[in-house]
Amino acid sequence: MIFMTESRGGGNRYEEQAEWTSECFSELDSLREAV
């Protein structure tokens, strides 16, 4: 899901990968509960 970093304006900033990944999973969990 590295492509998602582009939407955050940091496609080449891999050091933030862990941060947005944790946020992404949190949102995915919320979506799963909604469904």
Image (cartoon, rainbow, N blue to C red):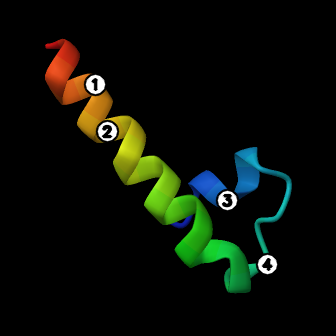
Residue occupying image coordinates x 73% and y 45%: 7
Query: Which callout, 2 or 4, points at the residue further toward the start of the chain?
Result: 4
Q: Is residue 8 left or right of residue 33?
A: right
Q: Position of residue 22 (x, y in %)?
A: 45, 62
Query: Which callout, 1 or 4, points at the residue further toward the start of the chain?
Result: 4
The residue singled out by tag 1 in the image is 31
- Counting other residues with Cα less than 10 Å from the Cα at mark 4, is it few (<14), some (14-19), or many (20 or more)? few
The residue singled out by tag 2 in the image is 28
- The CA span between labels 4 and 3 is 8 Å
Instruction: Please name which of the two marks, 2 or 3, marks the residue nearer to the observer.
Output: 2
Q: What type is the residue that disc 1 sits on?
A: Leu
**Looking at the picture, does residue 11 appear above or below residue 33?**
below
Q: Are marks 1 and 2 in contact (CB under 8 Å)?
A: yes
- The CA span between labels 1 and 3 is 20 Å
Instruction: Please name which of the two marks, 1 or 3, marks the residue nearer to the observer.
Output: 1
- The CA span between labels 1 and 4 is 26 Å
Q: Position of residue 35 (x, y in %)?
A: 14, 13
The residue singled out by tag 4 in the image is 13
Q: What type is the residue that disc 4 sits on?
A: Arg
**Looking at the picture, does residue 21 appear above or below residue 17?**
above
